[in-house]
Amino acid sequence: MNPVDIALLLLGASMALAAYRILAGPSRGDRAAGADVVLFGFVGLVVVLGLRVDSDLVVDIVLVCALVGFLSALSLARLISGGKR
């Protein structure tokens, strides 16, 4: 196994554990944190796969995914807090 395969395996395992956290989380905060971990695990998978295929398009995809993840984290935090600042 090369380092790219090991990274893919570890990222997949972390995403699976975070998906379990989403399903079994007792609170909405746990579910939101698990969703963030899954999203950024996906970003990591895209980066590692981009290294494997040697593509420059990956940078654009990663930037869009990171922006969507940041905005979703903000909106979930607002939803969990009940709209209070």
Image (tube, grey):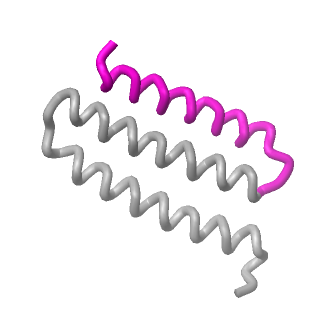
* Camera-nearest residue between 74 and 14: 14
Query: Residue lying furthest top in this view?
Result: 1
Above or below, comparing residue 28 to residue 4 in the picture:
below
Q: Position of residue 19 (x, y in %)?
A: 65, 36
Boundaries of the magenta span: 1-28
Where does the C terminus fall, quadrant-wise? bottom right
Where does the N terminus fall, quadrant-wise? top left
Query: How many dots with numbers?
Result: 0
Location of residue 24 (image quadrant): top right
Q: Residue at x 48, y 58 (%)?
A: 69
Q: Position of residue 72 (x, y in %)?
A: 54, 62
Query: Residue lying furthest bottom in this view?
Result: 85
Q: Is residue 27 left or right of residue 65?
A: right
Q: Position of residue 81 (x, y in %)?
A: 76, 74
Location of residue 49 (image quadrant): top left
Q: Residue at x 75, y 84 (%)?
A: 84
Above or below, comparing residue 66 to residue 85 in the picture:
above
Q: Is residue 60 left or right of residue 40?
A: left
Indicate yes or no whether the magenta region holds residue 81: no
Prevailing SS of the magenta stretch: helix
Indicate yes or no whether the magenta region holds residue 8: yes
Q: Position of residue 23 (x, y in %)?
A: 75, 37
Query: Residue lying furthest right in this view?
Result: 26
